[in-house]
Image: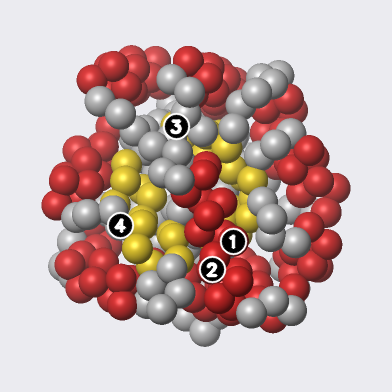
Amino acid sequence: MIHFIDSHAHIYLPEFDADRFQIIAGARERGVKEIFMPAIDASTHQAMMQVELEFEDCYAMMGLHPCSVGAGFEKELELIENYLQQRSFVAIGEIGLDLFWDKTFIVQQHEAFRQQVKLALAYNLPVVIHSRNAIDECIEVIKEFPGVRGVFHCFSGNIEQAMSILDMGLMLGIGGVVSFKNAGLDKVIAETGISRVILETDAPYLAPVPFRGKRNEPAYIEHIAQKIAGIIEMPVEEVGKLTTSNALKLFNKA
Ligand SMILES: [Zn+2]
């Protein structure tokens, strides 16, 4: 069986409360061994860490999602620092900027993003970046911090943006969007190759074709891998091997 990794899945959310055990067992049956869980905010940190306790090879990140950055974001960041002092996490994430939903707190989003990149450097952890409608803005921020490691999760930008990210030494997280018609991500991947790509579902969101619009789950990683294999004309086994090795390195599990 091919060894896959889901580098980004919110399996601790209530969407999976009724069948989490089956969902994780189903992922294992499809070769998805490790599942990396990006944090959102204080309302879900406990649930995330509980899943980490209950299931092997499910690893928690710590961070404040840009869509959760509001007036009281400093309190959230304090909590994150407390957690980081208490125990280890695999990454700082997900963090970044979101200019799609609500721009009210854009100044605070920038502040929270930079503070968390500094935490990543201080704790020698990679960053997992959310950059919805804000890829260029996120690239500009990351440029201010040479030496930072990480991934642009759910990357869906153009080739120039992909090259800037790779030039900075970061990776591209590729998920269901690669299977969407007209997304154009296939052409980008055809050019970049996958030497610095990791796979992700972003479950429960962004399910790949043929499950588009339904609840996403880690078992669907193989559909993303197969799509990529077709684009770059590489055996899916090789796609699994390369992306798994990339993810293990990124999260210091190699
Ligand atoms: Zn996410």
Q: CA distance from mark 2 to mark 1?
A: 6 Å
Nearer the observer: mark 4 or 3; the answer is 3
Q: Quadrant of the C terminus?
A: top left
Nearer the observer: mark 4 or 2; the answer is 2
By what rule are the colours in the image chosen? secondary structure
Residue 104 position by quadrant: top right
Residue 140, image x, y percentages: 74, 28
Q: Quadrant of the N terminus?
A: bottom left
Assign a secondary structure to mark 4. loop
Residue 170 position (above or below residue 71): below
Residue linked to disc 4: 11
Please report whichever mark, 1 or 4, sits nearer to the chain's N-terminal start: 4
Nearer the observer: mark 1 or 3; the answer is 1
Please report whichever mark, 2 or 3, sits nearer to the chain's N-terminal start: 3
> Can residue 102 be seen in the rendering of this structure?
no
Per the rendering, the mark at residue 92 is: 3
Residue linked to disc 2: 240
Query: Pointers 2 and 1 in contact (CB under 8 A)?
Result: yes
Query: Pointers 4 and 3 in contact (CB under 8 A)?
Result: no
Mark 2 nearby-residue class (10 Å; few <14, some 14–19, many ≥20): many
Residue 231 position by quadrant: bottom right
